[in-house]
Image: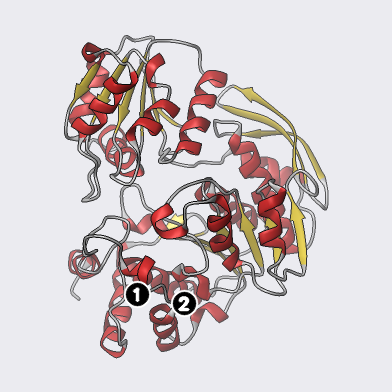
């Protein structure tokens, strides 16, 4: 490979469950023939890099990326060299593989992708896009001699490519209905799939409070379990200017009066999980000033991210009903009531009536429906018809296919004291963020 463009073209030519590229019609091999054989073969050919460092392994329906980012920041601030692997990316694939919070550079990404490409002929079954990136991240972390890796599951747990990692600490944020075509139709099915990351001897940080689901995770043989609401959690949580004011507790300590520079009460639970995970990994309490510094500068792009004022422009990648409810709750609690324009694009796996209802479309002044930049996009007209079915007046609904143009329409029609909320898919948020923040 001679450069970034060639490396990414090679990567993009592989089956990609996230975008649907290369996935046959109907149910993909991820659901019909789940296996870790491909990723195991890849990491073995790379010299088993994942054995060179301990890891924090995270799963859950919502909040994984925010928890991963905060956990990695806490460990880095504690003096460790930390690699992190998250997904999906918003704008550039480099975002997924980071060292101490900095995305991998183009040259390093080219290099590690080229190494994986050289191994591909020796693997009996062609790997997927996500498997390649997982192997690349694990190899890059070994190259950089990281002292800890924070690894976010892509989908589920048991059959996710990241599950070649044996996490010293396994984190479960929560369990809601999502990706039923791969994980099963019930929360119990989904919990069983996610519980696969909990290995005997690990410490489990369990953020899911439902006792019926907790039993599924507790049966996995962890040496130690810390549970939200029992061993760690949120003692106080109130909105503050540009964030939240929190009191958090963990098995090791209490941390009162923390400012978290993220919006949404659900981020308090994410912060508590990240703090518990970092403590369990380090096996000690963290310095209170260190924790305060990390949380006061926390960033989670595309998650209740304010990117403009007059009108307020907020990006949130809520892509399931639970995430949509969390977004709506945060808007009601933290932002003054004002005329609201929703810019919504959905993937075809999502039921548009459910998503729009959860987003409070009946209370919005306007809805602009668009198509996410993904082969899995749901037609914007289908979303618009669902809104009308729910009772939204036809003259309050617009259909603009491309995200930048949909955003421009919303900004043109919104009053200076209004709100423009871009949501429904991380693909929509990524495209909107590129247009707003980088002018792309």
Above or below, 60 against 371 in this view is below
Residue 375 in the figure: left or right of residue 343: left
Residue 305 placement (x, y as % from top left)? 44, 33
Of labels 2 and 1, earlier in sequence is 1
Q: Are marks 2 and 1 in contact (CB under 8 Å)?
A: yes
Q: Is residue 139 above or below residue 22?
A: below
Image-quadrant location for residue 216: bottom right
What residue would you read off at disc 2?
143
Q: Is residue 321 left or right of residue 234?
A: left
Judge by depth and name the residue closer to the eye, 297 or 252: 252
- Residue depicted at 20% across the width and 69% down the height: 3
Name the residue carrying label 1.
112
Rendered location of residue 234, percent (x, y) = 73, 37
Question: How many labels sit on residues?
Answer: 2
Whether residue 281 is visible here, answered yes or no, is no
- Dot 1 falls on a residue whose secondary structure is helix
Q: CA distance from mark 2 to mark 1?
A: 10 Å
Q: Nearer the viewer, residue 57 or 215?
A: 215
Observer able to see residue 142: yes
Q: Secondary structure at mark 2?
A: helix
């Amino acid at each position: 490979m001679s450069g970034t463009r060639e490396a990414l073209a090679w990567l993009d030519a592989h089956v990609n469950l996230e975008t649907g590229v290369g996935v046959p019609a109907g149910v993909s091999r991820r659901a019909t023939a789940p296996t870790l054989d491909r990723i195991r073969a890849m990491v073995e050919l790379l010299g088993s890099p994942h054995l060179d460092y301990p890891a924090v392994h995270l799963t859950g329906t919502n909040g994984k990326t925010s928890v991963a980012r905060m956990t990695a920041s806490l460990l880095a601030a504690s003096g460790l060299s930390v690699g992190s692997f998250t997904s999906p990316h918003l704008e550039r694939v480099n975002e997924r593989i980071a060292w101490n919070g900095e995305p991998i550079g183009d040259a390093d990404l080219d290099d590690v992708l080229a190494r994986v490409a050289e191994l591909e002929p020796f693997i009996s079954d062609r790997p997927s896009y996500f498997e390649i990136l997982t192997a690349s991240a694990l190899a890059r972390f070994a190259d950089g001699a990281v002292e800890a890796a924070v690894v976010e599951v892509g989908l589920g747990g048991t059959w996710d490519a990241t599950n070649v990692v044996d996490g010293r600490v396994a984190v479960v944020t929560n369990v809601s209905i999502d990706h039923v075509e791969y994980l099963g139709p019930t929360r119990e099915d989904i919990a069983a799939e996610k519980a696969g990351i909990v290995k005997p001897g690990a410490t489990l940080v369990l953020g899911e409070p439902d006792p019926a689901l907790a039993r599924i995770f507790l049966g996995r043989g962890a040496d130690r379990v810390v549970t939200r609401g029992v061993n760690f959690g949120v003692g106080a949580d109130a909105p503050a200017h540009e964030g939240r004011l929190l009191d958090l507790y963990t098995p090791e300590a209490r941390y009162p009066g923390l400012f978290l520079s993220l919006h949404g009460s659900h981020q308090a639970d994410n912060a508590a999980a990240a703090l518990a995970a970092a403590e369990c990994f380090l096996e000690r309490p963290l310095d209170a000033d260190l924790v305060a510094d990390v949380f006061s500068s926390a960033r989670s792009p595309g998650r209740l991210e304010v990117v403009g004022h007059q009108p307020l422009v907020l990006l949130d990648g809520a892509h399931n009903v639970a995430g949509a409810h969390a977004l709506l709750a945060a808007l009601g609690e933290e932002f003054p009531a004002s005329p609201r324009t929703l810019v919504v694009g959905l993937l075809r796996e999502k039921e548009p009536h459910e998503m729009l209802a959860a987003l409070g479309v009946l209370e919005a002044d306007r809805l602009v429906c668009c198509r996410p930049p993904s082969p899995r996009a749901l037609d914007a007209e289908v979303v618009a018809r669902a809104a009308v079915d729910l009772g939204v007046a036809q003259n309050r609904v617009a259909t603009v296919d491309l995200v930048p143009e949909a955003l421009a329409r919303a900004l043109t029609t919104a009053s200076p004291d209004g709100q423009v909320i871009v949501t429904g898919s991380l693909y929509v948020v990524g495209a909107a963020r590129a247009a707003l923040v980088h002018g792309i």
